[in-house]
Amino acid sequence: MVEELVAAGVTLASAGVVYVAAAARVVKQYERGVVFRLGKLRSQVRGPGFTMIVPGVDKLRKVNMQIVTMPIPAQEGITRDNVTVRVDAVVYFKVTAPAEAIVRVEDYRFAVSQMAQTSLRSIIGKSELDDLLSSREKLNQGLELMIDSPAVEWGVTIDRVEIKDVSLPETMKRSMARQAEADRERRARVINADAELQASKKLAEAAHQMADAPAALQLRLLQTVMAVAAEKNSTLVLPIPVELLRFLEKGAQVATSGQEVDAGAQRPASVESRTGRDELPPG
């Protein structure tokens, strides 16, 4: 009798252990458990830690509550200004309602991925090329709203969306490079012209100052000579003021006119002396 009771107790204990092993579940801190009893959703969501279910009757589905990083495959489209581009992005989302994410949609990850691709193509068609290149923050917000609107019904919240890269055709890259180069050249020419204008004004002021003090021009000439000589050049170019050349030219003209006057004064005397000799009778 005692042996039968012991055997029954051992059997019962073994059955209890097997039952506990089959019913025991552990939900991690970043997970939540959704229980279906005979196919019907239980309203209570199991939190993290140890929990029990009815084996053969209940079925526990664990849902990850962490933020999921999902890359959006590159989508090719035509912008509003008729430029073919290829854009890829990344979406960050998390599950906020585990029961809704399991019941309302078959696979919430796949659903979010398809919605993100569709929204990205829509954003490409509504935007211009300059917006894709320079106004990404605005496009990211619009893309987030487009994905988040249907995802809320699935128990999923979109944390943020980021456009990673915009690929352009090679012809468009060369055109943009030429445009940027032309714009930089235009700005360089404007800056050079502005510098020339400012320099001309300063030179005009300096010329007025030197006109009042002629010695300043000579000092400036000496400074220029010293600056050129300090470079240890084999050829020294010495600038000569235009006023000095005019002075030398005037001096040469005065000297030439003086020689002509002297020559005219000497010529009649020689003629008279020759005439006088001719009139004398022969001795």
Image (tube, helix red, strand yellow):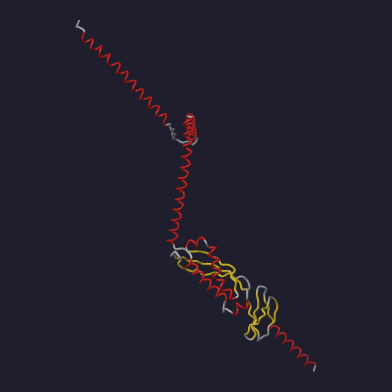
Count the numbered circles shown. Answer: 0
The quarter of the rendered structure image containing the C terminus is: top left
Instruction: Judge by depth and name the residue closer to the eye, 212 or 186.
Output: 212
Residue farthest to the bottom, as pictured: 1
From the viewer's perspective, is 15 left or right of 123? right
Q: Residue at x 63, y 84 (%)?
A: 40
Residue 84, percent across and down? 44, 65
Residue 86, percent across and down? 48, 66
Instruction: Judge by depth and name the residue closer to the eye, 56 or 140.
Output: 140
Residue 49, percent across and down? 70, 76
- Work out whether 219 lies above or below 106: above
Residue farthest to the right, as pictured: 2
Residue 142, percent across and down? 54, 67
Instruction: Judge by depth and name the residue closer to the eye, 52 or 162.
Output: 162
The quarter of the rendered structure image containing the N terminus is: bottom right
Residue farthest to the left, as pictured: 282
Residue farthest to the top, as pictured: 283
From the viewer's perspective, is 12 left or right of 168? right
